[in-house]
Amino acid sequence: MARTRGPIRQKRRRAGGGLLMLDYDGTLAPFRRDPARAGPWPGVRRLLQRISVNPRTRVVVVTGRSVEDLLRVYAPPAPVEVWACHGWEHFAHGRHTRLPLPAGCGSDLRRALEAVADLLARGARLEVKPASLALHVRGLPAARAAALLAEGRRRWRVVCRAGRLGLLQFAAGIEIIARGRGKGVVVDELLARALPGERVAYLGDDVADEEAFRRVRRRGEAIRVATRCSATAAGKTLRPPVELLAYLGTWLSHRGPG
């Protein structure tokens, strides 16, 4: 048995590596009216498992979901790292870490929650996360959804005047979040650890991924996963799930420097 493990490990070390960063909702998984049902596209879990066993490849899920919420719908293979809640939470090898919020953010988030509590009776859904609140209107009639988002945005802008929280837009919702982190910051931190010549890519789908696209284009591929074209900082667009799966397949055959 020991004689076979050595050559296998050497072969993995010789195989190409890189840094593969992926958003979750809308990228690895289709949007659902109930986010608790948003499991990965068929085939995604298996491909990421196969990619992540290469010791020279880092697979990182960068998501706006909380760690707890992500693990309910997708249990990533052990080698896969997770930056959740727009960079305020980290999960790797079974260890969950929450970064401390700047002073005053907790009380601001409580104010933000109180400011939109009555909108829930009108059909909005509120997602409470460690560093943010997200107001969802997916599945509501267009006029009501637009009115709820406009009202929520107006109320949360008042809370943001203290300067500790910022507003983000995403598909069918808005989010108020502690300043200082974000997907772009996470990408910069991950790129700082990347080796020269490594293949680098970031896959995302939404407005919240645009800053990450801009940061990663300095080093690698910025890829939008979407069924429709729109203005984006990404270099190309893939249609899920077929083109997404085909692209992930290229990471299995990639051979990097070395």
Image: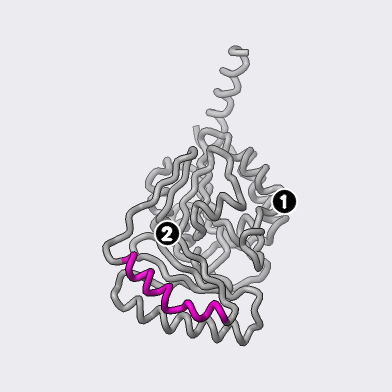
On the image, numbered disc 2 is attached to which residue? 130
Residue 252 visible at all: yes
Residue 1: mark in rendering: none
> Is 85 left, or right, of 180 in this rendering?
right
| Residue type at tag 1 | Pro
Residue 174 part of the magenta segment? no
Give the quarter of the figure containing the N terminus: top right
Where is residue 196 shown, x and y percent of the image?
Answer: 42, 42
Callout 2 crowding tier (Cα within 10 Å): few <14, some 14–19, many ≥20: many
**Depicted 163 relative to depicted 63: above or below:** below
Element type at mark 1: loop
**Secondary structure mostly seen in the magenta stretch:** helix
Where is residue 73 shown, x and y percent of the image?
Answer: 61, 52
Q: Give the range drawn in magenta.
A: 105-121
On the image, numbered disc 1 is attached to which residue? 42
Q: Say how many tags the image has.
A: 2
- Residue 244 versus residue 78: which sits nearer the camera? 78
